[in-house]
Image: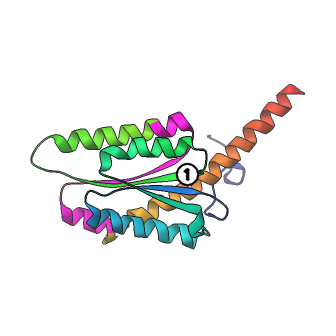
Amino acid sequence: MAGQSKSSAIRGELNATGLRFGVVVSQFNSFITDRLLAGALDALRRSGAADRQIEIVRVPGAFELPLAAKKLAATGRFDSLICIGCILRGETSHYDYVASETARGIQLAQLDTGVPMAFCVLTCDTLEQAIDRAGLKSGNKGYDAALGAIEMARLSQKLANNSSGARARRRR
């Protein structure tokens, strides 16, 4: 929104107190996904989420993330979800299909349900790149994704409150 001052912009907050989170984690490449999960849990806890506010669901691989995320979102129990996976490029085009359809599926699940879903699916050429993004040189992308999930949960709440207030004003 051009011309809008920063103070009037609607933003999310990094406060997880009272929010409920679902974390869907791929078991494939668990050496990486377990590190990403640890980073996500650290960020949630540091931001005020209690363990009882977090539910972890494990799926076989990245390709299964979208369906599990959509089913979790449909329960209405979660303010935001974090989808964690790791897809490493191999010698065939399989990587391209899995990476593309996983991203597309998570985006569609998010749009279909209205529940924010943080995308933490590493798509790396090498194991070294994945390790760097799971806690070494590039930080922990799981931690970053959890912060995004918190912020989007709060922003979604604000947007829902603004739209219900706007509807009430239009009815008057």
Identify the residue at horizontal 17%, vertical 51% (top origin): 89
Q: Work out which residue is located at the far top of the displayed protein and give it.
A: 171
Crowdedness near tag 1: few (<14), some (14–19) or many (≥20) residues, C-alpha within 10 Å: many
| Quarter of the picture holding the C terminus | top right
The image quarter containing residue 99 is top left
- Colouring rule applied to residues: rainbow
Image position of 33 (left or right of 23): left
Tag count: 1
Q: Is residue 131 magenta?
A: yes
Q: Work out which residue is located at the far left of the displayed protein and give it.
A: 91
Secondary structure beneath dot 1 equals strand
Image position of 52 (left or right of 108): right
Identify the residue at horizontal 66%, vertical 42% (top origin): 3
Q: Is residue 125 magenta?
A: yes
Q: x and y percent of residue 128 in the render?
A: 20, 66
Q: What's the amino acid at mark 1?
A: Ser
Q: Is residue 138 above or below residue 124?
A: below
The image quarter containing residue 101 is top left
Identify the residue at horizontal 64%, vertical 53% (top origin): 154
Q: x and y percent of residue 42 in the render?
A: 48, 72
Q: Is residue 117 above or below residue 34?
A: above
From the viewer's side, name the closer residue of 68 and 95. 68
Q: Which residue is mark 1?
A: 80
Image position of 148 (left or right of 92): right
Image position of 164 (left or right of 47): right
Q: x and y percent of residue 19 in the render?
A: 63, 58
Q: x and y percent of residue 1 in the render?
A: 62, 40
Q: Bounds of the magenta span?
A: 109-134
From the viewer's side, name the closer residue of 81 and 139. 81
